[in-house]
Image (cartoon, rainbow, N blue to C red):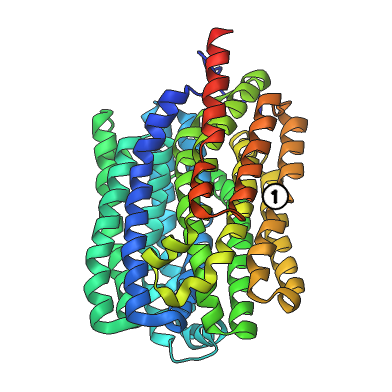
Amino acid sequence: MVGAGAEPVGEPRLNLQDFMRSAGLLSLSSVSNLLRAIVTTKLFALALGPSTVGILAQLLNFSSLMATIIPLGLTTGVSRMVARAGPDSRSLAPVVGTSAAVSLGSGIAAGILLAPFSAQISTALTGSSRYTLLVLLIAASFPLYNLAWVLAYVLQGLAAVKHLTAANVANAIVTVVLLIPLTLAFGLTGSILGVLIGSVTQALIFVVAVAHAYRLRGWPVRGLTLDRATAATLLRLGGIVLAGGIAMWGSVLIVRTVAVHRLGGHANGLYQVAYGLSSQYIAVFMTWMSAYVFPRVAREARSERIQLLLNSVLRANLMLMAPGLVLVTALRTPLIQLLYTHAFLAAAPLVGVQALGDYVRVVAWSFGVALFAQGYVRTHLVAMVVQSVAWVAATVLLLGPLGLMALPVGYLISFLTWPPLLFGTVRRFLSAGIDGENVALIALGLVALLATLFVPWPVGVLLAVPVPAAVVLFQRRQATA
């Protein structure tokens, strides 16, 4: 909450050049993940085909849902506690040690509990029990993936940008090296086997990254401790994160499962194009929001500084994400041909509508990130749940008249709930509102993105220019004021 932390000094606004450099470095991990996605998506499309890709998507969505539940929310809460502890290694020791122990224990327990129900899970996800073994392989990957995830959030809280980037890039490379031969040799089973082996390599990579970050700061790695009070605080924050994650990933799983049962595996595989592209660029956005923006917001203590910081965050996000979304929408057909095959071209209309939903998401979350960072965790949870319920409800209602298009349209409708909710609560609790220049930038970006849906792609590419150009003009005017 405002006033809870130490008083930061210096300019509260983001330095746009510094942000761009850090975002560029952080984006290397996202670019590596994107390149991994390009390779693996093409691999899956060629080796598995639309129907099997739909089954794979269901299994991976289940894995993602479990990856949200099983760590007990020890993700953003860990990052917040690490960020607010600052350079005090004695305060950090119980946070890191306790969160790592809990993540391993909960992963082991979850695997043991879910194993007897693997056949039922397979049937619920795919309509068949033939994928029981694959569900078991996914369950076996939980403990070490949990550990790796928690350690990644430790690096985020430390703002250890270089270590986080190096670990993510290394993990992306290892994943591709594993998946290609396994998928070509064993098909869908090989792909899921790659998930299990990847959990081992990812955990090792992040253990090394955190240990190196500690050594550079002169902190003893052996000083990590377990602490009941820290566990209670982590689990309290984690409960909020967990509930929100269940809501969000649960909505994904429900929407995709409804699509499988009502439209078939082929249609679900087509929507994976729009959802897969969306997941990649939103991952880029969330990476710099988590590792660069979140720790800075968490450390701020005065509402006027928070307002300046959040407006600079929104402007920086618009400069990067607005043109990115325009380019994805303008180039959606060649992107599908590059990443998938001609069999997936029917998904092109879905991509633009999904991008509209992501534009609203980016704009709203640029301010909404402050709620959890400043301690308004229940309001943060309400936003997660409202969006999730809205997506499921809108999709189910629209599936009859719109068919497959109901999924991205429902996605857009669900995120339209965020601007009034997040901007309103941030203004109420933190006295922080959007400035007039950012309102103009939001409108300009929305017009450019909407226009891209209807113009030929060469013209659509040019529509990526206006928002960054306007941001530069505003920055120059601010510098000379």
Q: Secondary structure at mark 1?
A: helix
Q: Residue at x 40, y 27 (%)?
A: 88
Q: Is residue 199 left or right of residue 315?
A: left
Locate residue 35, reporting x and y percent: 32, 56
User: Is 216 in front, or is 317?
Assistant: 317
Above-or-below relation of 197 to 27: below
Q: Is residue 423 left or right of residue 191?
A: right
User: Is 268 in front, or is 291?
Assistant: 268
Q: Is residue 229 visible?
A: no
On-image quarter of the C terminus: top right
Q: Is residue 175 visible?
A: yes
User: Is 353 in front, or is 410?
Assistant: 353
Above-or-below relation of 257 to 332: below
Picture quadrant of residue 56: bottom left
Locate residue 316, reporting x and y percent: 52, 31
Q: Residue at x 41, y 25 (%)?
A: 18
Locate residue 75, reporting x and y percent: 49, 49
Residue for badge 1: 383
Q: Residue at x 25, y 51 (%)?
A: 170
On-image quarter of the N terminus: top right
Picture quadrant of residue 478: top right
Locate residue 124, reporting x and y percent: 57, 84
